Image (tube, coloured by chain):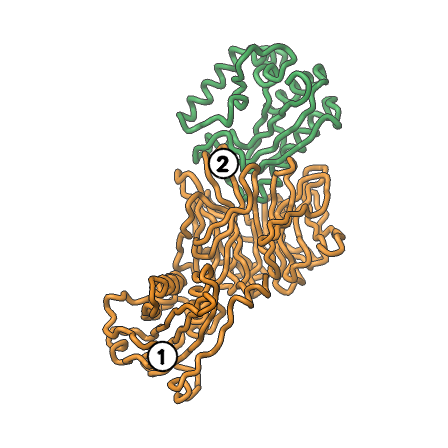
Amino acid sequence: MKSMIKAIFVAAALGSAIAAAIVPARAQLEIDVTQGNIEPLPIAVTDFLSSDALGAEITSIIAADLQRSGLFAPIDKGAFIEKISNPDGAPRFEDWKVINAQALVTGRVTQESDGRLRAEFRLWDTFAGQQLIGEQFFANKANSRRVAHIIADAIYERLTGEKGYFDTRVVFIDESGSKNQRKKRLAIMDQDGANVRYLSDGSSITLTPRFSPTRQEITYMSYESGQPRVYLLQIETGQRELVGNFPGMTFAPRFSPDGQKVIMSLLRDDGNSNIYAMDLRSRTTTRLTNSAAIDTSPSYSPDGSQVVFTSDRGGQPQIYVMSADGSGQNRISFGGGSYSTPVWSPRGDLIAFTKQSGGEFQIGVMKTDGSGERILSSGFSQEGPTWAPNGRYIMYFKEGSGSGGPRLYSIDLTGRNEQQIPTQNFASDPAWSPLLE
Amino acid sequence: MSGIAALIRNPLVVALFLTLAVAGCANKKTPNNAADLGLNGGPATPGSARDFTVNVGDRIFFDTDSSVIRADAQGILSRQAQWLNQYRQYAILIEGHADERGTREYNLALGARRAAATRDFLAARGVTASRMKTISYGKERPVAVCDDISCWSQNRRAVTTLSGAGS
């Protein structure tokens, strides 16, 4: 997969006399994402020149990505003064400063003789009168949405100084039918809700899919053999495989950061659940917890040295951290209420969780020692946080009282900018992919 | 004890109780299927699966986030054990379920613990362990689907299902 994608996209810096003439110093134009309350940056995303509608389509995907991030405010095209007719030349910066477009995106989409798309774009700092990026990408026409997401990531990275997250996908559970006979199918889509593809037929319940951090592979739980069990699925080939052969239920799987292990819960004969790690190459299994309690929802720290998990060994579900070998198990959640579904952030500094308190469900984050708890969203029912690969956004599923079923939502780490991800049916258990390569 | 058992053994009383339970939830409850209410057609012939569902009671309920067999459930399970020991042709699958007021993975584990507690209770009453299997559905298979406690309390359950000859 990796090599295939590399073959599809060839990025190159556009030679630009304009850019070369300017001091190559870091531009003043930058969003300070460390502040709690961010004023979205006004940006003009002009339609890429093209002989068909594709230029405008790509532009609208870029603008939508930037808008949803909460860090950018794309300016309505009706306000534009200059019509970009030559994307190779400098724009009339005054025309863009007048409408307060601090950043400007111009570009062109053409078709190569071999049928591939060629997308070129430039990002301008209008107040400094300076080009910040000039790049071009080649792609198959079927991948035009990805080209748009890659360009949006390049803009996001240049202006925020953080990695982007638009060229990513989300695996989730598509839910249809009445609540007591609901069909739960494995599905995958782009992070903006486009390109939905089903990965299971819905004849048996599938739950809790999670992306491999290193391969186009997911692990999930399914009832297809009767007893609920953890499986691996190669996304491109559709090849499936049982993870281990245990007598009882296996559930709550998640990959290790190197993609070589799956950590999960195994049901014991006494009805309690313990956490095990299985090495996918050697097929050896290591037991990490051994309590007469429910131990589940394990999640590795990004360096692989620690595991955070849920246990009710203290009487109700709470969050614990242990070393990756199972030693040093310590409770870290001490707020009022119960805590579950902990997920370590890709940056390593925070743990996202579901909290139940006062009859409500909440999505929150805490530091890895349990301090600094912040609730990002509260409501009738919401659970299952997953991190965007840049660690700035969290996606989860949420259901209002009487709404009939769950939908996917994303929220900024600061608790701002909660947005529903458009899905045709009800949806749950989102899991964000790493940045595609 | 024998008086209560005799009362509940009466199919009419059971039917009345079920009617009240449905009315109490005012259209909010939709049965999973006919078997969930024990309303399969045909007579509840002694020793039939329907006899078990209607006259013995195929399910018990739990308190929130608990897998302790409640006093009311102990009576039902004792009758289940008696019946299962009499009709040994059945294989037994015990389903553990949770309400929706918990997270998905934790509730899978909770449903499994409820099913195991039910199995262990039946085993202690003489039901052969090798006849019994358990499965957890977590909160994935509610029978009552309203958004309040009247439904949640019905979903926190363990259901003893029968397969094999005569079912």
Camera-side residue: A282 or A71?
A282
Residue A315, image x, y percentages? 61, 43
Count of numbered circles on the image: 2
Q: Residue type at mark 2: give it.
A: Arg
Q: Secondary structure at mark 1?
A: loop
Q: Residue type at mark 1: give it.
A: Asp
Chain drawn in green = B
In this view of the protein, can residue A34 be seen by the observer? no
Q: Secondary structure at mark 2?
A: loop
Residue B51, image x, y percentages? 60, 14
Which residue is labeled 2 in the image?
A182
**In the image, is residue A217 above or below residue A404?**
below
Tell which tag, 2 or 1, sits nearer the viewer.
Answer: 1
Position of A269 with respect to A424 (left or right) is: right
Residue at image x 61%, y 61%?
Answer: A214
Please identify the residue farthest to the front as the structure is shown: A113
Which residue is labeled 1 in the image?
A88
Q: Earlier in the sequence, mark 2 or mark 1?
A: 1
Residue B102, image x, y percentages? 53, 42
In this view of the protein, can residue A266 be seen by the observer? yes
Discs 2 and 1 lie in a common subunit: yes
Q: Colour of chain A?
A: orange
Other-residue count near label 1 (Cα within 10 Å), few / some / many at <14 / 14–19 / ≥20: some
Camera-side residue: A306 or A138?
A138
Residue A160, image x, y percentages? 43, 72
Camera-side residue: A265 or A246?
A246
